[in-house]
Amino acid sequence: MTPRRLAGLVCAVAGLAVLHLHMDGLLADGGLPLTEQLRLVLGWHTPETFAELNFCHALLPRACMALLVGGALGLTGSLMQQLTRNMLASPLTLGTSSGAWLALVALHIWLPRHVAAHGAPAALLGGLLAFGLIVFITGARNMDGLPLVVSGMVVNILLGAITTALVLLHEEFARSVFLWGAGDLAQNGWQAVLWLLPRLGVAPVLLLAAPRLLALLRLGHEGASARGLPVVPAFLLLMAASIWLASASIATVGVIGFIGLLAPNMARSLGARTPGAELWTSLLLGAALLLATDALAMLAGTWTQDVVPCGVAAAALGAPALLWLSRRRLRAQDTVGFSFRGGARGRLAVHPVVLALLAGATVLGLLAHILVQPEGGAWHWAAPSAYQWSVRWPRLAAALCAGAALAVAGTILQRLVGNPLASPDILGVSSGATFALVLAGLLFGQAVSAAQWPVALLGSAAVLAALLRLGRAHGYAPSSLIIAGVALTALLDALVQFCLARGTGDSYAVLLWLSGSTYRVAPAQALLLAAGTVVLTCAGLGLSRWLTLLSAGRDVARARGLDTRRASLVLLAVVALTCGLVTSAMGPVTFVGLVAPHAASLLGARTARAQLATGALVGAALMLWADWIGQTALYPTQIAAGIVVSIVGGSYFLALMIGGRLRSPHGQP
Amino acid sequence: MRLMPEGYLMHMVARTRLRQCPALLAAMACVLAVLLVPGVARAADAAPQGVRQHTGQHAGQAAGQTTSPAPIRIRDSRGDIAFAAVPRRVVVLDWDLLEQVLELGITPVGAPELAGYREWVVQPPLPSGAGGEPGDADNADTVTDVGTRAEPNLERIAGLRPDVILTASPQKDLLDALARIAPVVHLPNFAATDRSGEVAIAHFTTLAALFGRQELARQKIEAMHQRFAELKTQLAAALGPSARVLPLRFANTTSVFAYCENSTARYVLDQLGLTDALPQPPRAWGITRMPFKDLHALADAWVLHVLPFPEEAKMRATVLWQSMPFVRQGRIRSVRPVWNYGGAMSMRYLADAFAESLLRTEAAQ
């Protein structure tokens, strides 16, 4: 990175800032000429007219906010990517946004009086606490690399599910918090900037001190400690400082993704090689990106006659950019690759007792579904009436089949990718379904409803087609497909937040769909799902030999005569079809596809066939119980099975990771 | 080293036991075919139906009750429905209809989210003791909570043995499931095409016809219009004829929700002889979001902001707030919390709240 390039970048940021300040004037009447703006900035002229006041107290702080937040996010992103050595780490990966989101929603629901005074501090605290939880899970010694990213992901899903449940149960209270979730930079005074500014005081210290530490850490732990660096404290300190910066930014302006992810990647592609150069370039690029994004958000807001929050614009620009980056720069080693040690290493087959217990749990779940009568004060057992049966059986069948199908899809995908953390929902197929529904709702002004499931299926199919097209270049190497899924999911999140922020009753329907409930599964859909599950499970079992070969490595598989490209294609199609089927029936359901295969292998199902079968059983039992708990815990109010599964599955995962850390002496899970 | 494609494929089939492959493809085709069937079935369901006939009462419920000999015919959004008798046991699945029914003096046996109703809709109050377990469901004065508006508990509703189920737009895709319990009357409102105020009054009249309370409804509507007229005179005296008013809610400190032309707020403005200062094209749910600073062009207009707005004190301290013309002229008033998605009579409460705020003399800020 030459000084000349750096100077060019500074000029670009300055130019974008000027453009940003002019945007409002270009879009509406009453913009001020540049000379007038300069006189106001320099204090040669006191603002009097509305245009002048607007410039001094709305536009100028907005531009400053974009500069500060963009710079902070870029810097944090770079720091995190260097620390974790993962090019997909971003400030939002490590629980900051989900923690802050949960804290704000809780504040709005239970302490609405304190929203004005304590909103930002609460969000900051939430973000920091979520990070604290992640540190507790991974252990301070084990903070670099994948365990950190993985626990971040799990904490994100867990907290996200809890927040969604809260919002769904307290719709009216949570309504005012939605705009924050969408990430809006609009200002009407300097208070927010002045609140944020001192909290960003860590940044200059980081810029001065971090490059040396990062350079030493690049040598690896042994190399760094050999040169006298206390590795763990240094690592923890840097990470805590960057989390602090990210949390403070998010607390002030809301969730703005992608900036912290893109800026460091762009910095590296611009030729930033040393840690210091990458930090500085990312900082400048982050500021430039956010200024440009916010200017575009203003433009889009004028076009659509609506408030388009910056976070939505950032996602709309960032998702394609991430895809482009994934094509150009990311290789398989950059994605999350991770394995649990310990567990049932010795066991090579599922013990019959375990199988019997699993089957028992499933049957018990079925019986609970069918026979328990929560009505009338005291719960009791009784045969369901004809009407109860007609309401219960489609839900029961949907839960059972969705669990089994997702478990099969998860097993196939995990073996295909060679990564026990791959979950079918991260392929983006479920997100594609939801995306199509939300978009159709936005364009045609309809509420999202389960009756539109063909739209959902169409969305899944479109994503699948895109994935296959995209994957052809890589021989269907799943890592690039997963990045596409991540990008699409983030884009979807932003779109959903945008819908929620519209504040109408329809936005609530989006959230309801996202929670993954069996409530609206019609008998025809249940039958369809059942048929699909049977067919796809049989397909999975039939293809288990391919899976066995692929798990042994692509080269081995090829040497044994398997056309790995074709096998990947077919297996991927099975996974995507399953996801599309389940999502169109009951909305996106996370975690089953992740947890069930994992639990199956912990129970001793080592061969592909055994893992598929045991996983399906685990998944079915899990979904069945989640659905039943969701229906009965707050009777007559219901919680979606998808939410219950996320909370249960997330807790299971966290327990597993903490347990793994405590068991092994070096804290390596 | 590649063989001929066919030979290669054969080789592979042999090596990998691909016997299942054709079966797999056939199975996938089956899945796709099955996927399309319910869509067709759904299209068939949409066939127009004639008058839906209902006996109106559960067997065994009619004893000792006077039934009108003429069948009751009402028209909901899906067509004509005939009831042989006035339905006694009513389940209401949305708050606006719950409000309408309570105004008609009917106590439903089931309604959703009662705690939320008490918190947000407030008026008219639910009968005390509502929300109990359905153990005492046969007691006609008790309202049982049936879960959320979007996902009401079907089994509990069925257990309440209703004579009629009243539904609104959030239950649009549940109509078939509910129709298996009891006759369903579907009265949606607040779509972009609904003029919410007029639709709410039409629903009120429809419900009055269903429950045989037309006289009460007529009196209430008349009283409401009389109240509008009184308030109109008072407001004209205080603010001059057709004063320009902008009702809104703050979304946060930088953006607001303005009420559109199809909202109940706009209906109330019209009835009170006030002019909408910033008319917005109709939208679903009658609100549209806009940046707060866009209000700077409002000259000589009153701004009514509906509470709650937790960040109000913070907002008042900002320079932009103080530079707004309506703030400088002292023409901004807060309005006590009112429910915007209510029934016909809620517009009377809305009008009272608006007028109360506009007539309140407030020291210059």
Image: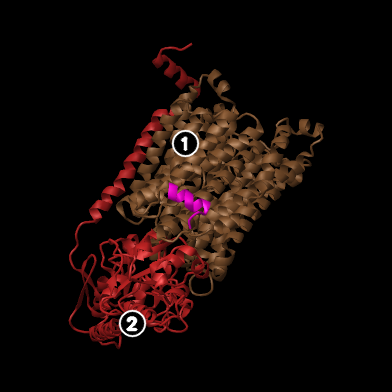
Q: How is the image coloured?
A: by chain
Give the residue pinned by disc 2: B103
User: Which chain does brown denote in the image?
Assistant: A
User: Which chain does red denote in the image?
Assistant: B
Main SS of the magenta part reads helix
Residue A597: image quadrant is top right
What's the amino acid at mark 1?
Answer: Ala
The answer to whether dots 1 and 2 both sit on one chain is no
| Residue depth check, mark 1 versus mark 2: number of the one nearer the observer | 1
Specify whether residue A44 is painted magenta: yes
Circle 2: element type: helix
B284 sits to left or right of A333: left
Circle 1: element type: helix
Chain letter, disc 1 residue: A
Question: Where is residue B129 drawn, in percent x and y?
Answer: 47, 83
Residue pictured at 40% horizontal, 34% vertical: A466
Question: Where is residue B27 drawn, in percent x and y?
Answer: 38, 36
- Judge whether B81 appears above or below A652 on screen: below
Residue interval drawn in magenta:
A35-45
> In the displayed image of the protein, which residue is found farthest to the front?
A44
Q: CA distance from mark 1 to mark 2?
A: 56 Å
Q: Looking at this view, is A453 or B133 the one in front?
A: A453
